[in-house]
Structures are given as structure tokens and as C-alpha cells.
Amino acid sequence: MIRVIIAVILTAVILIATLPFLGIQWLIQRKRPHFGERGSFRFFQFAFKAVSLPLGIKLDIIGRENIPTDRPCLFIGNHRSYLDVILGYPLFPTMTGFVAKNDFTRVPILPIWMKRLYCQFLVEGDLRQNLQSILAAIENVKQGVSMCIYPEGKRGTGEDERELLEFHEGSFKIATKTKCPIVPVSVNGTRECFERQFPRVIPGHVIIEYGKPIETASLSREELKGIGAKCRQVVKEMVDRNHDLL
């Protein structure tokens, strides 16, 4: 429990400390819309690393060389824990926004930063709002910003992490409409470290793997049909393989 308390205190201190900069950035961005974006992105990558340190998690990363650094892409993968975001965000090499459930809007200050870092929010049952969020994510990619989405739509809560939920095909419009590559991501071990004995965090082993990009620009219309199911199979194979390494 002490690990969670330390992480929560760190998070609160970081968010409160950024309040003055939020105001300054807002004033300057009225004339310079993209002021401070890169610095803010790197700062929150550092902050997420700091928050994860007291959790005592051993993190192994596989396939980081598969992430494109010269163009935006769509990251997709399985989702088991809030730790997926905390551990994964510092690994992005370039500006990346999340398409996330609106649960994060309940955390003071954090949603303001998320919106400034190109995050879009989904509201359960609100099809119109969710369509707008996907369209906004598409525009982000067109502007050179990578996006990350969990196509399962929610965190998997089953006992066996190898059992993935179905991937929503609509999530992949971010890639098919922009012709950006899709980078499959698998995460193993995060639920066992946190959600399984919530609110405690226990030290554990987490593996994050980045698969080879799927080039949507080279796929025919026929090949793009059912792209979600195809990507799910790729992620599942990665999850199955890494499960045996924990």
C-alpha cells in the first residue's frame, strides 16, 4: 500500500506544480498555438517515469526499433491495467496522444494537459461524441501526431491475460483514413501488479512488445476489411509468447 501512496503523492505534487505553467502556456498559445508542446510531452514522459519508480516494477521492452520515428502511426494493443499507460507513455519517441475513456476527466488538472497533448476522450454510449473524438484523432495524425488506442474498448478483467476482448473495427479508421502504419503493442503482467489486488501494487515483471508496423497504405480495400480482427490476432500471438517469459 505504501507504494501506491507514494505514487499518488508524486502525481499530486507534479500536477499542482504545473499549474503556473498551464496559465503561462495558455496565454502564449493564443498567438503561438503549438508553443511548448514538445517540452510538455517530454516533461510528462519524465513524470510518468518518476511515478512508476516507487512501484518496483521490472520492465522489459521488446521491439522498440519497430516504432517509426519519421512519420506518425497508430499504436494499438491489449489493455489490462492503468499501468499500461503509465509504463507505456515514456516509451513513445515522438508526440503521441491517446484516445481514452473519459474516466481521466475526473482527475483534477490532468485532463487539461491531456487535451493539450492531443488526447481525445470517449464516452460510453455516446456515439456522436465518440465519432467526433475519432475524427479529431484522424486530424491529429494528419498533422503529424501519432495516436494510441485500445481497440478492446475497456480493460480486460479476466484471470487469463491471454484472453483478449474483441477489437472494435471503428478504432482502426484512424489508420485507414490517414494511411498511417499500425504498430501492434502487447502488454503482459500489468494487471497482476495492480488491479488484481487493488488498491495495492506489488513489485512484478512487465513485458511490453512492439510488433512490426502494418503498412495500411500498401493494403487493398479488400485487405483492409476486418483489419481489427487481423491486428487482434497479431497482438494475441505476442501476448501468448511473452506470457511464458514472466
Image (cartoon, rainbow, N blue to C red):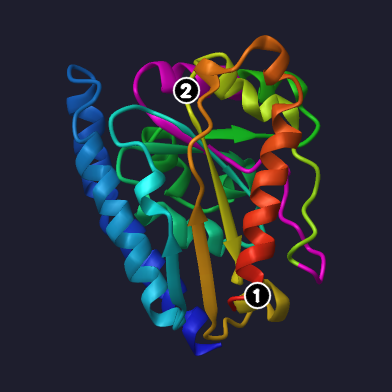
Does 233 sit left or right of 96 as displayed? Answer: right
Res 140 → quadrant:
top left
Residue at left offset 32%, top offset 61%: 47
- Residue nearest the observer in this picture, 167 or 37: 167
Res 48 → quadrant:
bottom left
Badge 1: residue crowd in 10 Å (few <14, some 14–19, many ≥20):
few
Q: Amino acid at mark 2?
A: Cys
Residue 171 x %, y %:
66, 29
Residue at left offset 71%, top offset 32%: 228
Residue 190 x %, y %:
60, 69
Residue at left offset 80%, top offset 59%: 163
Was residue 134 drawn as part of the magenta stretch in this picture? yes
Does 70 sit left or right of 203 as displayed? Answer: left
Q: Secondary structure at mark 1?
A: loop
Residue 87 x %, y %:
45, 62
Q: Secondary structure at mark 2?
A: loop
Figure check: 49 above or below 88: below
Total count of labels: 2
Evaluate if marks 1 and 2 touch, with contact meaning CB atoms under 8 Å apart: no
Q: CA distance from mark 1 to mark 2?
A: 32 Å
Which-is-in-front pick, marks 1 and 2? Answer: 1
Residue 189 x %, y %:
61, 72
Q: Which residue is mark 1?
A: 244
Q: Which residue is mark 2?
A: 180
Badge 2: residue crowd in 10 Å (few <14, some 14–19, many ≥20):
many
Position of the N terminus, as image quadrant, is bottom right
Q: In this picture, which residue range is highlighted in magenta?
A: 133-160
As drawn, which residue projects farthest toward the top? 221
Residue 69 bears which disc, if any? none
